[in-house]
Image (tube, grey):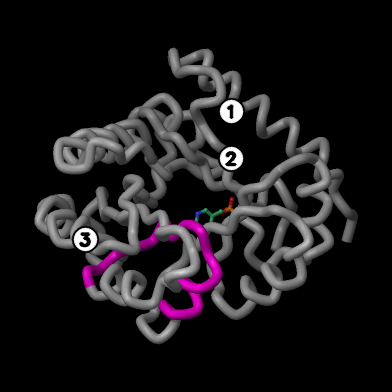
Amino acid sequence: MQSIDISSTYHDILSQIRTAEATYGRLPNSVQLLAVSKKQPIEKIRQLADCGHHAFGESYVQEAIEKINQLSDRSLTWHFIGPIQSNKTKLIAEHFSWVHSVDRLKIAQRLNQQRPESLPRLNICIQVNVSLEPTKSGFLPDELLPAVEKIRQLPHLVIRGLMVIPAPAEQFVVQRQQFKHAHDLLKQLQTIVPDADTLSMGMSADLEAAIAEHSTCVRIGTALFGHR
Ligand SMILES: *Cc1c(COP(=O)(O)O)cnc(C)c1O
């Protein structure tokens, strides 16, 4: 397979993000790029780290831990973004700095119990099912605030914000509507947790709409590293 030039795709994506920030009146550098490295070889992660990038997202626990261990000579920040089975929470609590995909109370409770005392509190985003899809994970919008009231009591977690994966939509206005809903929910969350500052939303196909609606973290895989 033709190898892609990671440094050049990296700078292209950063410039897309910076352009969208300027276009939609966002502060410069208010949107972070999370490089989604799931199913990508370790060599590509090294190449991106060599460009000065630190934040990586992974979805498969076992694979992620191998990478985290092999790259322990670099100071990288690892974000778990995949579906969480309850028998995997311990490994996630031990190896990651962030979890974006907290989608049930039980998962939050287990991560809290299993976060080692020696580590800083685990940063979490609560996943919300903004498009109300029956098969999608995440809290329904109505369930969010009652869940937050419980999760905020857990001493080893810090609620940083929300994560959404809306139903795919081609039209920009439809993409924006779903992301606006997520931003409205973040504002509600901030009435209880004023420090919650993170809105993890936007992927390759809808990054611009997400930034227009106040995303603070776009999660990009294929467009950065090539096909998995
Ligand atoms: C895989 C994944 C991404 C990145 O998807 P790409 O299509 O590779 O850019 C973003 N967010 C989540 C939750 C993912 O699982």
Badge 2 amino acid: Leu
- Neighbor class of circle 1 (other Cα within 10 Å; few <14, some 14-19, many 20+) is many
Residue 157 sits inside the magenta stretch: no
Which SS class for mark 2? strand
Measure the alpha-carbon separation of dots 3 and 2.
Answer: 26 Å
Q: Which residue is mark 1?
A: 17
> In the image, is the residue at mark 1 within 8 Å of ligand 1 by its beta carbon?
no
Q: Which residue is mark 2?
A: 33
Q: Is residue 209 visible?
A: yes
Residue span colored magenta: 89-105
Who comes first in sequence, dot 3 or dot 1? 1
Vertical order, 160 against 39 (above or below): above
Q: What residue is rendered at 39% in x and 51% in y? A: 165
Which SS class for mark 1? helix
Measure the alpha-carbon separation of dots 3 and 1.
Answer: 32 Å
Quarter of image, ligand 1: bottom right
* x and y percentages locating residue 117 in the rendered image: 43, 70
Q: What residue is rendered at 18% in x and 54% in y? A: 148
Disc nearest the viewer among 3 and 1: 3
Which quadrant is home to the N terminus?
bottom right
* Residue 151, label in figure: 3
Q: Quadrant of residue 56?
A: bottom right
Callout 3–callout 2 Cβ contact below 8 Å: no
Who comes first in sequence, dot 1 or dot 2? 1
Q: What residue is rendered at 24% in x and 75% in y? A: 106
* x and y percentages locating residue 79 in the rendered image: 53, 58
